[in-house]
Image (cartoon, coloured by chain):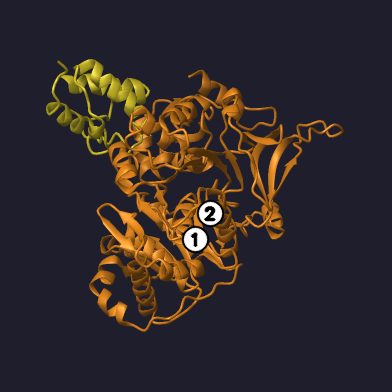
Amino acid sequence: MFKSVLKNHIADSYLDGDSSLLDDDTELLALNIIDSAALFDLVAFIQQETHKQIQMQDINPINFASINTIDALLQTTAEET
Amino acid sequence: MDSTGSIIETFETVCHRYPDNTALICKHTTLSYSELLACVRAWSSAIDQTLNASKSNNKVLIYLDKSLAYVEAIYATLSQGGTYIPVDATQPIERVQLIIEQAQPDIIITTALRKETLEPLLTDKNIHHHFLTLEGFESNKSQYQQNPIEPFVKPDPSHIAAILFTSGSTGVPKGVQITHQNLSYFIDWAVTELKITDQDCLSNHAPFAFDLSTFDLFAAGTTGAASWIITHDQQRDVKELSHGIKNHGVSIWYSVPSVLSMMINAGALTTSNNATLRHVIFAGEPFSLKGLAALKAALPNETSLYNWYGPTETNVCFSHKVTDDDFTRSSLPIGAPLPGLDAILLPQETQDKHHPNQHCGELLISGPCVTPGYMNVEKPEITAHHKVHQHPTGDLVILQDNLYFYQGRLDDMVKINGNRVELGEISNCIDQLPTIKQSVVIYTEGTETPKLIVFATLNHQDSKVNILQIKKHVSTQLPKYMIPNSLVILHRFPLNPNGKVDKKALKTLALEG
């Protein structure tokens, strides 16, 4: 389940390793958990873990608003061949 | 630009001289200068009718999303000889309320929904204001447009054109007053330096509450150039930014460095979309030479790069045009003062008084760029300077080879993505949490990925608090860029020999990670 991998990564990298209170709808950008610099590190992590290529036009505040929106994006993103 | 007139007089002339030029672009809508002028007249009439009086010194607080209407309302205010007070609509309502309490505007321009939220909160505090809603304006627009058209009011150069609220260390935002003379001085210089004409298109990336926006708006509005108003949801969307530069033929880009770095990291600046860029200007925070080199490599050879510097109290007062030599230095210079300004380096107490280093000290700016000070905060030591058009910046600066270099701050104020932040304002907010006994916030400025780190002691040793709780609490009161990144719980704070919290020791702890 990639959502739990993502959740652990976000907690470890951006929340002092503490995942309590972090849920799939927690606002990642609005709460400044992910800022514009961290966003591209997160994209690199997701691509590495899922072998999916995220296009530039998909890197936007709507798709990266929460773990759930990222997951929804990944559902529509094809794996690299 | 006509150097003898105010920006609003020049704007009126430009509207008549270039009626068919595109003045504003926002999302899929464009306005020509003649259309913009008609809208400005209508807003002006709406303000008068809402206040039931025609007055030339209204304070108009604008609490809208970035939009064409926001710009129209700004120009309408200035056309009546009033003062515009821009509020960033993305910040929490508590902070907006604080700004309103401090600003005491004659009228608030906002949406019906925001009025519905705001009015009862203000009424509870026995504060009553006139409201003009965007919806009310739109529904009566034709009636407002039919009213007799009055000429623009010619403002006195010393009259306050805008009040921009910035972070205050006590938790109360400070309102920096900007005169017509301040704006004219800066815009006049910028238009000449960059040779801006009615053929240019300027990006407007910064929120209107941020002093960077005065360049984009008024440099365009006084030359007949176009301004591309970048909305909040487009500001960090690299695809939107990339397409906008290409589709609108942006020739002058101005933003904080972090936005440029974001575009570079995403590969969003390419020769296929940036061929029209004549100038790329950045300000608000230091740009690393590594980041700058990546930017330069992505731009056409003929695009010039500028580093502008200046606190809100002076707006831009230093400029540096990037040269190849800069890439051999250890940091990028802030350059030299604009023509007509003086820079003095004040020796620091820590220096040897008998052998002061004249090339290092707190930068004091003197000249017509210096604003008359704060509307709501009395700082006697600074007010005395402002009266004689001087501003002690609080920035430590060195002078080498006739170029000035920024070295850091002398106090707790930091710049985050170009926004001024008093760290004490964040601590005050965190201290409201019942579990927190005391907090001190440190910013690891100068590192590759600077962070806001909270050091805190707890009221009870067995209390629990984590960074996400703090983020959620701070997000209800302060703008996003002031939300901390990390939390460190201490049993007690390290103290310096004076018995105060040793912030240097905390910074060392923060840097050690």
The answer to whether B455 is drawn above or below residue B119 in the figure is above
Kind of residue at disc 2: Val
Kind of residue at disc 1: Gln
- According to the rendering, which colour does chain B have? orange
- According to the rendering, which colour does chain A have? yellow
Residue B53, given in percent of the width and then of the height, sits at 42, 82
The answer to whether B170 is drawn above or below residue A33 in the figure is below
Label ID, residue B191: 2
**Viewer-closest of B190 and B482:** B190
Per the image, the residue denoted by label 1 is B102
Q: Residue at x 42, y 42 (%)?
A: B277
Q: Residue at x 37, y 70 (%)?
A: B37
Residue B71, given in percent of the width and then of the height, sits at 38, 61
**Residue B487 in sight from this viewpoint:** yes
> How many residues crowd around disc 1 within 10 Å: few (fewer than 14), some, or many (20 or more)?
some
Chain letter, disc 1 residue:
B
Q: Quadrant of residue A23?
A: top left
The answer to whether B461 is drawn above or below residue B18 in the figure is above
Same chain for mark 2 and mark 1? The answer is yes
Query: Regarding mark 1 in the picture, which secondary structure is present there?
Result: helix
**Residue B376 in sight from this viewpoint:** no
